[in-house]
Image (tube, rainbow, N blue to C red):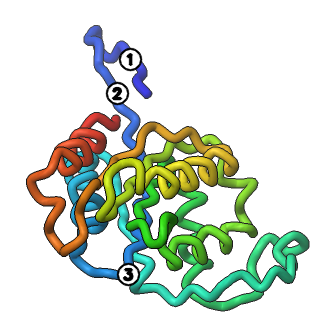
Amino acid sequence: QKRICNVYGYLLLEMKHMKILVINGSPRAKGNSDLLCDEFICGAEEAGNQVEKISLREKEISPCRACYACFRTGSCVQQDDMADLLQKAEEADMLVLASPTYFLTMSGQMKVMIDRLLPKWQDLGGKKAFVIVTGHDGRQGLRRTGEELCAILENLGCSVQNIIWGERVWQKGEVIGTKAMTEAYEAGRQLS
């Protein structure tokens, strides 16, 4: 958002930069999802935004137990890395969810993390969001993953800006040189 100020007779344009949390659900380090996240981050940081990336493969996050204690307390009874992630998600202005496509849906790591959003799901609304999807299929084979992630974010009250499709990439690095890399960078760079 922009605000025009009149200071000492000059018009100054003051930019409000965003705090962005990128959550990568790929179990593979330096894979195609990672590369697209990094391109998005590069563009977003060049635009002056504050960005943090969390790779779920590096976190200890247990599945939801469906005990619903969080409905009474506002926090999960499990003591793992999800508490820190929840706080960062709540404080962020924008969420970016990235996942490879496995058996026509998101990675298991991403689904477990999403289920654990339960203690704060009512506090995540009003944020902008992006989705990054990769996989060896074309758009049709990746579509369900993208639609599911968008539907989840919208159900949380987020406004999904776009999906970045890393199509027909499987082996590490295959996304390099594709239009998805340019789209990820430009999507980040246009944020301010």
Q: Residue 12: x, y in percent?
A: 29, 19
> In front here: 125 or 107?
107
Quick check: marks 1 and 2 in contact, CB under 8 Å? yes
Q: Quadrant of the C terminus?
A: top left
Q: Residue 42: x, y in percent?
A: 20, 53
Q: Quadrant of residue 82?
A: bottom right
Q: Give me the disc on residue 14.
A: 2
Q: Reply above or below: 30 against 134.
A: below
Of the two numbered discs 1 and 2 on the same chain, state the one appearing first in sequence: 1
> In front here: 170 or 119?
170
Q: Nearer the viewer, mark 1 or mark 2?
A: 2
Q: Residue 105: x, y in percent?
A: 51, 65
Q: Residue furthest right?
A: 72
Q: Quadrant of residue 152?
A: bottom right
Q: Reply above or below: 109 against 122.
A: below
Q: Residue at x 33, y 63 (%)?
A: 135
Q: Is residue 75 left or right of residue 152?
A: right
* Residue type marked 2: Glu
Q: CA distance from mark 1 to mark 3?
A: 47 Å
Element type at marker 2?
strand
Quick check: marks 2 and 3 in contact, CB under 8 Å? no
The residue under label 1 is: 5
* Residue type marked 3: Pro
For label 3, count other residues whose C-alpha is less than 10 Å away and answer few (under 14), some (14-19) or many (20+). some
Q: Residue 132: x, y in percent?
A: 38, 54
Element type at marker 1?
strand
* Residue type marked 1: Cys
> In front here: 149 or 10?
149
The residue under label 3 is: 27
Q: Is residue 37 left or right of residue 154?
A: left
Of the two numbered discs 1 and 3 on the same chain, state the one appearing first in sequence: 1
